[in-house]
Image (spheres, rainbow, N blue to C red):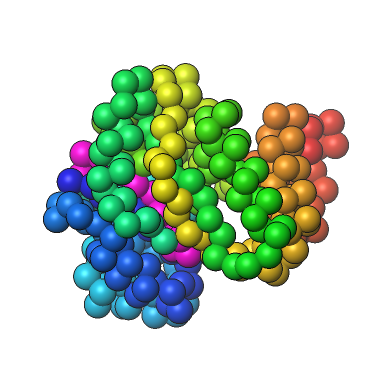
Amino acid sequence: MISIVVPTLNEAAIIKETISQVKKSGRDTLVEIIVVDGGSRDATMEIASSGGAKVIGSAGGRACQMNAGAKVAAGDVLLFLHADTRLPDRFDVLVRQTLATAGVVAGAFELKIDAPGWGLRLVEKGVNWRSRLLAMPYGDQAIFLPASVFWQLGGFRELPIMEDFELVLRLRRLGLMGIAPAPVVTSARRWQALGVVKTTAINQYMILGYYLGVSKARLAQWYRGKKPEPPDNPSLPL
């Protein structure tokens, strides 16, 4: 069985379609959908439940939510899906084929962004190049892996940001990251809200900050556009 874990927060507008699309795209009847809500103030949980998903609540934060979903999952394979991302047709077959490749310990899909524009096409090319040549897919590419491998690593580290990046770094120490030969289609809402150049720059700053040792709390503030708070101890790294 493949267990699809979907962390949500105020996704009432799209969660029904997300669940429906998963059901239509899979060929394996043994697929379960687990929606893990982090404190929505809308009808996300009710809509997800009526759509046939298993619904649980958890503390907020994507890493915490995904770990909570993994704990109740019955599948031997876990797939972590953002609520605004659509899986390709026959995704379940592609997952099994990718994980069956020699040396592969986990995988993800190629990326397509659901909006027109040459800037977004360049982003897609860059993401897919990075994923294949550097073996560094991100969370919006629907990371999947055997449940046994996930728990061997201790799950996601419950960071306020970049939990997907950190997990992939640990996975690469175990083996290869496979990239399934089909794209997920993710919403362009963040690129449209901030612009392609600004969004891409922010993403690169996050990676640079990670390697420079900037605290994850500070990175999360920057990513969400909040004014950084002064450190309690000025001698500590930002």
| Res. 213 image quadrant | top right
**Above or below, 101 relative to 6:** above
Depth check, front residue: 168 or 188? 188
Could you say where residue 214 lies in the image, as x and y percent from the top left?
73, 36
Depth check, front residue: 160 or 124? 124
Stretch of the chain drawn in magenta: 75-85
Left or right for 66, reference 141: left
Could you say where residue 215 lies in the image, as x and y percent from the top left?
69, 38
- The residue sitting at the right extreme is 234
Indicate yes or no whether the magenta region holds residue 62: no
Left or right for 222, reference 234: left
Q: Residue at x 70, y 60 (%)?
A: 118
Could you say where residue 231 lies in the image, as x and y percent from the top left?
79, 43
Asked whether the viewer can see residue 224, the reply is no
Depth check, front residue: 200 or 47? 200
Depth check, front residue: 48 or 172? 172
Q: Residue at x 74, y 37 (%)?
A: 209
- The residue sitting at the left extreme is 29
Left or right for 74, reference 194: left
Asked whether the viewer can see residue 197, the reply is yes
**Above or below, 167 relative to 175:** below
Total labels drawn: 0
Could you say where residue 63 lies in the image, as x and y percent from the top left?
47, 47
Left or right for 228, reference 17: right
Q: Residue at x 26, y 38 (%)?
A: 96
Indicate yes or no whether the magenta region holds residue 83: yes
Q: Residue at x 48, y 24 (%)?
A: 172
Q: Quadrant of the C terminus?
A: top right
